[in-house]
Image (tube, rainbow, N blue to C red):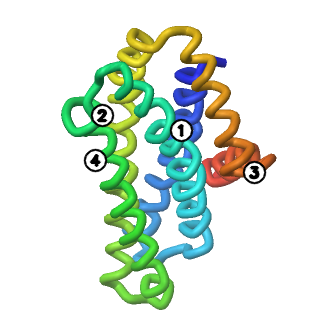
Amino acid sequence: MTPIETLKHEHQVILLVLGAVDKEVQFIRAFAKVDAGRVTKMLDFIRNFADRCHHAKEEDILFVRMQAKGMPRNAGPLAVMFQEHNLGRQKVAALAEALPKAQSGDTTAIAAVADNLEFYANLLRAHIHKEDNILYPMAERIISPDEMTEIAAAFDRVEAGEMGEGTHERFHQLAHELAKV
């Protein structure tokens, strides 16, 4: 699998969880309560799989290589990607902050959980579309096959070193578990 195929596959797993997020938002809005255990699992997936694993591969490896090929970090497509990653992190932090109060029945916090989940899901869907259809094809044009092989090896190091053996599979299982409900 090429690095771009790996990232696109990870997008499909993330989209699976975003579908579960949509259902959770509907549940929260319909019943004005939060299933803290389920939302905590979503947070775990988002923070660790989507951000710590997937976004790290993009920001620390692919985007760096694209910058080395002349694509600016602070303007154009890469700037948008970094900005959206950071905005997503802000929404996840706000969600995590509101969750304990929501669990206690605080209606403002319950609304904040739903709002931040919904915003994050919508943001990431649009973000994934941009990466899959604009940024990744650009990367494939400017990065040589040999460099892609180096990127794939770097991705493997992220999987093994940063995430730990078996973690990727655990998050795939969690994604499918969340999607079932």
Disc 4/disc 1 C-alpha distance (Å)? 16 Å
Rendered position, 173 above or below 45: above
Rendered position, 111 above or below 42: below
Crowd around label 2: few <14 · some 14–19 · many ≥20 (10 Å): many
Q: Amino acid at mark 3?
A: Gly
- Picture coordinates of residue 11 (x, y %)? 52, 35
Among numbered discs 4 and 1, the one appearing first in the sequence? 1
- Residue receiving disc 1: 57
Among numbered discs 1 and 3, the one appearing first in the sequence? 1
- Residue receiving disc 3: 164
Disc 2/disc 1 C-alpha distance (Å)? 14 Å
- Residue receiving disc 4: 83
Among numbered discs 4 and 2, the one appearing first in the sequence? 2
Q: Secondary structure at mark 4?
A: helix
Among numbered discs 2 and 3, the one appearing first in the sequence? 2
- What residue sits 33% from the left and 29% below the top? 130
- What residue sits 22% from the left and 39% below the top? 74
Disc 4/disc 2 C-alpha distance (Å)? 8 Å
- Residue receiving disc 2: 78
Among numbered discs 3 and 4, the one appearing first in the sequence? 4
Q: Amino acid at mark 4?
A: Gln
Rendered position, 67 above or below 144: below
Left or right for 62, reference 162 = left
Among numbered discs 2 and 1, the one appearing first in the sequence? 1
- Picture coordinates of residue 87 (x, y %)? 30, 55
Q: Amino acid at mark 1?
A: Lys
Left or right for 110, reference 44 = left
Q: Amino acid at mark 2?
A: Leu
Q: Secondary structure at mark 1?
A: helix
Residue 76 image-quadrant placement: top left
**Residue lying farthest to the left in this orientation:** 75
